[in-house]
Amino acid sequence: MSSLAFLRALPGVLPALRGNLLIGLTLAVVTLPQAIAFSTTLAGLPPHFGIYAAIWGVLFTALLNPSRVFSGGPNTTMSAAIGVILLPVAPQFGADYIGYAMTLILIAGMIQMLFVIIRPLGRMLDLINEPIINGLICGIGLFLIFKSLTGFAGLPINTQVEWPLWIAWQSFMAVLEIGNLYAIEIGLITLITSLVARQIRALRNWAILIGVAAGTAYSEYLNATVGLQNTMIEQIANLSSVGFVLPSLPLFNQEAMSDIISILPGAVTLALLGLFQTVAAMRRMNRKIGSYTDSRKGIFADAVSNCLLPFLSSLPTCASFNRMWLVYSLGGQSRWTSAISALILLLMVLFLAPLIAIIPMPAMAAVIMLLGANMINWEDIKPHFRNRGETVVFLASFLSVVFLDLFGAVVVGSVLAIGYSKWEQAHPKISLRGNVLKIRGNVYYASLPVIESMYHTAIEREGSVVIDFSECYYIDQEGIRWLAAAKAGQKVAFADRRKSDDRRELERRAAADQKRKSGRRRGRTDRRQRSQF
Amino acid sequence: MEAKSVSAVPAKLMKIALIVGALCGLYLMALSSHAERDQLRKASVDLTPNCKAKLEGYGLVAAEHYRSPYVQAVNGVDSTVRGYSEQDVRSIQRGCNIVDDLQGQLAKRGARERWNADRFVRGTYTTCIHCHQSGGDKHDTAGKPVSGSNNLGASWVMADMYDRFSGLIMSHELRQMQCYINASNGFKPNSADDLIRDVTAYSRFLSAALDQKMGQRYAEQGLDEIPFSATRRRGDDYVRGAHVYREKCANCHGPQALGMVVQGKVLYPALAGPQSFTMDSRMYFGTLNSLMPGFICRNMPLGAEGSLDNQDCRDIAYYLGTLPRPAGDRQGPLVAAWQQVMMGVMPPLTRYAESLGRNHTEHPGD
Amino acid sequence: MFRSQVSNAPGWPQFRAAYGVDSFGGDGYFTRAVQNGYNLFYFTPDYGKRFTRKTAADAVHSCSSCHTAEALAYGLVNSDRFDAGLDRRVSFEERVMRCYAGPMDGFIPTLYDPAVRDIRVLARAVAHHLRLSEGARTDGS
């Protein structure tokens, strides 16, 4: 019976499968160079970590989330955070570094799990508004461009604490003065080819791949003519050890304890960066497509994935708006496309490993520069400058990334989020028309100073006040006590919420009062004017 | 719609042309900078007087073999090792110049001759010989390397050890970079920079000249240390240190340890404040409390070396450690910002407050 | 299964004893780096597989196929010199990187990658054992 039902359903399923196959292929091809670049240029990990994130990370997040549109995968910001956090701990690409990276991701995953288990904590993420996220993202975009400078020129990065924005100028001068010219040429060809390809609509999704292909072709030409030993170009290198899966053990032993403790703040940073991005991406996706998926589900998918992926030699994952939008705009369904793209990637890595191995690192650095530049999107930033509060928050968030490290930026972002929402709540809209003091908003301990100031102004001017709190959203105990004390003063009446007729009568009287007063003022003004002549 | 898309094409082409033009311009700048560097590498080197004396004393010439006059004189042994080519000799000469005159004040073409080292240090004060005296190779009157004199050759042969402050195996290049970050409160040159490579070449030459063996610990490596156990164990006291500092050090290093600069030349380096070493430096008492006392007791005061008690040296170092100085990389940007504020605000405030109180209060014990 | 700890390759205890690695400590960052260097030097296809296409079946498959540990040490103390063929000064690290790319038919590792650093550390440990100074020549002079 069930097999008959399956066969009957097949004609309907096959076209959908074919459609998702193409989308999955597109997704795989778009993700592969990015995943490798994130791993090698940003996180300081061998390329298979990015590849496994693009396979297992994408698959886990899709399967763990019931949403049709949710899609996770390797992420620039999280990869960059790993590189920054672990730089003082061990030299990149080494066995120690890899062990610490896996431990870092596991701890971050466990912290993310707390946001799932403790619901109010997860709810706090909704306080992170768009200006904060966009500020962080723009700052990180700038960071990515400067971080890639040394890789672009085939120069070693400085394996100590380094905040690239501080030494951006020195890195730039180093590129000009001592950079490997062959590397620079490869990077430039990759950049220019990608930029040109992006302008052609049909090639937009493939622009990065085309750029990388061009850079690789030139690199191979140089190696054939000049020789790799003379060009000294670093490449992705041998991926033959990469198989279906590569189990790994995070580093966790007695002697590593001090280093693990030192990276705990970094784990918090990594966890929060992932959560912020997931919540923001899902919020944006919901609004764009006019549907709703609870971001809790995305957080759950992230947290579980990031607890599992360290054991599979993978970078951490979080939601990606760009990836979700790509799948949606092509008409795909996220679970199918994720599964298909994961399979295609795996096949590509297994069968095309020798080709992937020769991709030059300067091309990867160019990819990161492009992605960084894409993160600074004026269309996303522009709306924030129409509102003063949002402008301040956006700039503070952006500058905190520029001048503080990622941990500082996350702290500032979190503080801003809470502070901004509190500021908005603590400044209700208060109007005084005649002797009617109308409060729209919250009457609570933080807004009372503002309310009381207006109240006393009203009492001095009018002698008595009618407090209209019919449009109050919330009154706390302190608000109630203040209202009671004000009423006891016998100069105060409350507008009766139940009788709308009375309310309208009060407003009518207040408007009439106002008109009379302005009429008298005009009369005085007219008399003053007449007296001048 | 079609008209709009047609007019958008030239705009797009312009945008691409601009970007490609800018990138090509940068590439041409890179070619020009590379050519300039190549020229400098091939140019003959004007040695500083100290370097001229030192390298001539060690018999550095381009030849197939190298025989160190020092080894011959001291050990009575004719040690012949591999010689240096012209290019190697120039690299060693440049390295010596960098150590002796980091910011190119004695150079005809200024900092360019020192591979723009001034880009990596803050202010015009800092130079390597503040700590690596006599070009990183200080000898006593008998001609022997002085113990605890920060010898650069000894540093080369002992490189690649684990460094607990950075948590890394410290190659000679990284150690130089640490100096730029910590001791000179600066930025970092890239480890592939000629600035680093030439100083490495010079350090390696010194180790050849002194016949130092790989992995061997020499007394002239690093600085002498004075741990707490080398005192009468009465406890370190920064107030006592401030008193000794006022008596013995302030005349040269200034009452607030901000150093002395006369006519643009550093006479005595800063020991606190923005021109001084950072909180990550090993000279900072809070990081390593035995090193600065060792340096002080070995080398200070100038002309009266060895006159200070071990406890005095620890107290002075402790006192200097309490004065505001720049934060290191590991302290993070918030501490860095705080330290910048403290360095800007506290010294003038203290100076003013002390000037008010000076008429009425004498320091006890002065 | 990937583990961070350095693996014990065949012959390491004997090498360690023969070259006095324990003078740097029974264990520790430096000693482990020497051990990793040993693994890379003698078993390059297993421990340096990212930077070589060679396998154990190839005739020349490891650094030790062409060099001895002593030669490596002499190479270190004679490095950072002008190379007429390349018309520039060439560091020890660059020579190692060129070896990976050339004879190992592989790829160029990054300068501070342990695949390069630990070869240098191995060379240093052997140079210490042989009491070599800068510029020491293999003919003993």
Image (cartoon, coloured by chain):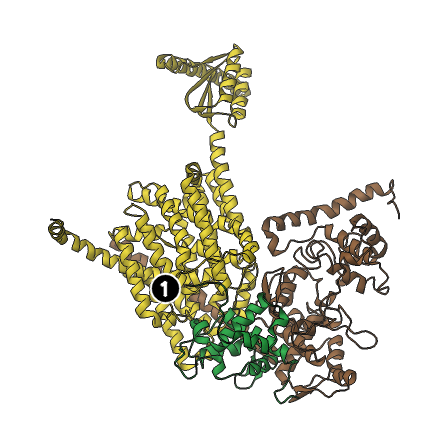
Q: Can residue A323 be seen in this view?
A: yes
User: In this figure, what is the number of numbered marks?
Assistant: 1
Q: Which colour represents chain B?
A: brown
> Residue visible at 54% across and 74% down?
C13
In the image, C119 versus B315, the foreground residue is C119
Vertical position of residue C91 compared to residue A349: above or below:
below
To which quarter of the image does residue A158 belong?
Answer: bottom right
The residue carrying mark 1 is: A194
Looking at the image, the residue that sits furthest to the top is: A490
- Give percent across and percent down for residue C110: 49, 70
Label 1 CA crowd tier, 10 Å (few <14, some 14–19, many 20+): many
Vertical position of residue C40 compared to residue A97: above or below:
below
> Residue visible at 37% across and 70% down?
A240
- Give percent across and percent down for residue C114: 51, 69
- Give percent across and percent down for residue B29: 51, 70
Looking at the colours in the rendered structure, which chain would you say is drawn in green?
A: C
- Give percent across and percent down for residue C107: 44, 74
Vertical position of residue B351 compared to residue A309: above or below:
above
In the image, A256 versus B64, the foreground residue is A256
Q: Mark 1 lies on which chain?
A: A
For numbered disc 1, what is the local secondary structure? Answer: helix
To which quarter of the image does residue B149 belong?
Answer: bottom right
Q: What residue type is labelled 1?
A: Ser
Q: Which colour represents chain A?
A: yellow
Vertical position of residue A119 compared to residue B144: above or below:
above
> Residue visible at 66% across and 47% down?
B341
Q: Is residue A291 left or right of residue B260?
A: left
Q: In this view, does C139 lie to the left or right of A108?
A: right
In the image, C24 versus A474, the foreground residue is C24
Q: Is residue B268 visible?
A: no
